[in-house]
Image (cartoon, helix red, strand yellow):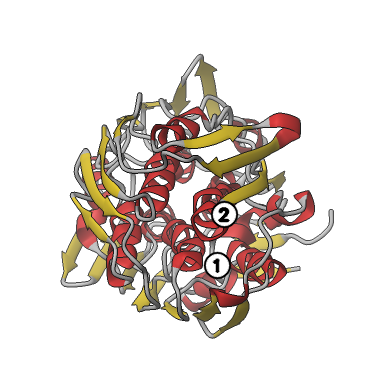
Amino acid sequence: MSDYLRIRGGRPLNGHVSVSGSKNAAVAIIPAAILADSPCTIENLPDIDDVYCYRDILSFLGADVEFAKGVMRIDPRGINKNELPQELVGRMRASYYLVPTLMGRLGSAHVPLPGGCDIGNRPIDQTIKGLTSLGARVDTDGGIINAVRGDNYGGNEVFLAMPSVGATINTMLAAVHAPGRTVIHNAAKEPHIVDTANFLSSMGARVKGAGTDIIRIDGGHPLHGSNYAVIPDQIETGTLMIAAAASRGDVTLHGTIPTHMESLTAKLLEMGVYVTDEDDIIRVRASGTLRPISLKTQVYPGFPTDLQQPLTAMLTTAWGTSYVTETIFESRFRYVDELRRMGAEIKVLESTAIVSGVEKLHPANVTATDLRAGAAMIVAALMADGVSNIGGIQYILRGYEHIDEKLRSLGGEVEYV
């Protein structure tokens, strides 16, 4: 085993912790800065591998980039490259947000197909549909996304077959530099889409309707630099809420947006967990036996697929049988084998996991199969009475800022080895 997390579980988490900036917002907002005609300063960025990857990518392209203490300053005026090597973009999924922004700045983009976690098929056909609807010429020959602004590049009606987050953001990023009116129908509504739209608006873009299923953009206007702070991370908030409840602890989270957490809060209340909120604070308390639930992942504002794995880990010790249906990614149950190594009783039938609660989990050496599976392993290890070692932490470092330090601040025995 290479680098890993060592966790001694079986003790409740207690205390106060602050939530970091949103990973999903950061990886869309950073490439959007390429479109500005002057420097941008982006604050409250999480200290995670995906952000450092973007720093390296922008520097390679010719931008002047500084990143320290959660603040990135980007001067895009030196960008003179529109091609990227696989070794840079293969480190994360969100690299395809560079396609519309490089195309907007330089007229064309040549970006290798994205990497990231292997959680099932994540096609980019809806992104291509959005770009071609605006008049771009796009192909994926040789594993490269090649996009060129056509002679008739401009605003148009875009009808997405499904409310894809990636396609919605990519179409927004393309539409702000496409002259004329673009209307995105069946748009995704996630909080980081709203945050990306707000950042574009702060640069001078004209974007309305983000957070609804119809987004209207009047494109072609010059975009200037901006100072902007990204929203709190919805998924880190949820993971810490689940960890608090799973360990039967009492944790107060600061710097949150409680309305973003309503679908999770509803499920925790159904399980018998106490959840209260006020302003930007959420308190989670749990003790004793938890009740089983039925759960189906859905697009926002439904239950997020990114919290399915850690909540399923928590359900392994709920008294009774829980049913968890995954509707977004077909390979998101790969982590179940690791939970079984810890004594969980889970059967997977097609897209549904049937979880029969056990009295307790036992410690084991397990491996994170993707980012959110890593969160599930952490939750399970906190519940198990003894020492567990979690490998594959390169996935965890992609999306959770200093998760070991935050858990230690709550009394968890967590060590990065």
Question: What residue is at 52 percent from the left and 60 percent from the top?
Answer: 105
The residue beneath circle 1 is 403
Residue in the image at 44% along x and 81% along y: 41
| Identity, as a three-letter code, of the amino acid under mark 2 | Ile
Rendering coords of residue 270 (x, y %): 22, 40
| SS label for mark 1 | helix
Q: Which residue is mark 2?
A: 378
Dot 2 crowding, Cα within 10 Å, few <14, some 14–19, many 20+: many
Mark 2–mark 1 contact, CB under 8 Å? yes
The amino acid type found where label 1 is placed reads Ile
Picture quadrant where residue 188 is located = top left
Q: Nearer the viewer, residue 199 or 93?
A: 199
Could one spot residue 373 in this view of the protein? yes
What is the distance, in whole Å, between disc 2 and disc 1 at their CAs? 10 Å
Q: Residue furthest right?
A: 1
| Horizontal side of residue 24 vs 64, given as left or right | left
Q: Residue furthest top?
A: 349
Q: Position of residue 312 (x, y in %)?
A: 45, 38
Q: What count of labels does the image hold?
A: 2
User: Looking at the picture, does residue 73 appear above or below residue 46?
Assistant: below
x, y percent for residue 128: 50, 33
- Residue 314 visible in the snapshot: no
Which x, y percent locates residue 73? Answer: 52, 82
Left or right of 353? Residue 57 is: right
Kindly identify the residue that appears in the image at 58 percent across and 67 percent down: 51
Residue, x 60% and y 79% (percent of image)?
65
Q: Is residue 137 above or below residue 69?
A: above
